[in-house]
Image: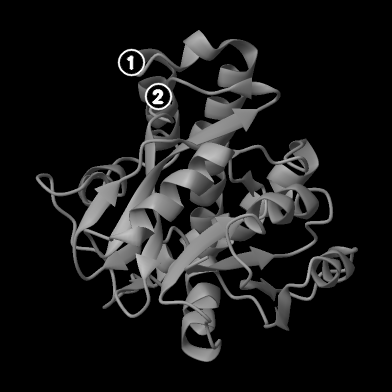
Amino acid sequence: MSVSIIILTYNEELNLPDCLKAAKLLSDDIIIIDSYSKDKTPEIAKEHGCNFILNKFVNQGIQFNWALDNVKFKYDWILRLDADEVLSNNNIKEIAEHLKNPISEAYEFNKRIIWMGRRLRFGGIYPMKVTRLFKKGSSRYEERTEENLIVNGKIKSLKYDLVENNKKNDMYNFTIKHLHTGAGECEEYINKINFSDSIQPSLVGTKSQKNRWLKLNFYNKSPMFLRGFLYFIYRYIFLLGFLDGIPGLTFHFLQGFWYRFLIDCLIYEKKK
């Protein structure tokens, strides 16, 4: 055991037991930063012996950086997990093996998303690289709505997928979550907030840098209300999202079109 684990939570009683059961096989230093949950999340965390800390939520990046600045970690390596992610035996063995003799400052996973009972393979959703394991002091998150981890050093890829299977990712919770994140993206767009801690947009950089460049220089400059539809067509048709059947249709329509259309509605409403 040479890694500390941070999990951000809010009303995660459905997901948290499976997440913690696996996490405890890797670490005896599990820290939960909770945003004042109203369900059984605190009881579940304490039953599993976690360090349970309350902090007001602004966005994911700010919450995680607060933990980096205020929590005393037992180990020099930190793994961020979401409550709907469960480490496999292969994940645990691979992480333990790499940390015996680390060759970089951070490691990234391929994230596998389960939506409506189906693994999503197309539409640009897989492979999705997420950097989650890093040496303490080497990394911080952007403090914006769509945050990336900024690593001062090398990033190596891990072999085994990290699986997200959110048990509360029904239509109601999906809508509520995206109403909140949509409001955050609207605020950043309207106020043209310049994040000094952001990754540098670049067409020749990492996937995150390319995505940021495309968003700032192409998507944000495209016609409002039309751009969400074009983005959906790109993902669903050109990136073959339709091959994931009905789950693919619903995911790409909601996350690729509806969510982006919602943000444009919020921007329009704010400007009026």
Question: Horizontal and vertical percent for residue 186?
Answer: 49, 61
Q: Residues within 10 Å of mark 2 (few under 14, many from 20)?
A: many
Residue 147 on image: x %, y %: 42, 61
Which residue ends up furthest to the left in the rendered image?
204
Left or right side of 207 for 205: left
Q: Which mark is residue 163?
A: none
Q: Is residue 95 above or below residue 168?
A: below
Residue 76 in the image, given as x and y percentages of width and height: 41, 76
The crowd level at tag 1 (other Cα within 10 Å; few <14, some 14-19, many 20+) is: few
Tell me the residue at 27%/66% (across/down): 151
Q: Residue at x 72, y 40 (%)?
A: 169
Quadrant of the rendered image containing residue 246: top right
Q: Quadrant of residue 214?
A: top left
Position of 142 with respect to 74 (left or right) is left
Quick check: 245 left or right of 83?
left
Q: Is residue 58 above or below residue 259?
A: below
As helix, strand or loop, the secondary structure at mark 2 comes to: helix
Instruction: Look at the image and tell me whether residue 269 can be seen.
Output: no
User: Up-down: is 24 above or below 250?
Assistant: below
Q: Nearer the viewer, residue 116 or 29?
A: 29
Foreground residue among 44 and 88: 88
Colour treatment of the image: one colour
Q: Which mark is residue 235?
A: 2
- Residue wearing tag 1: 238
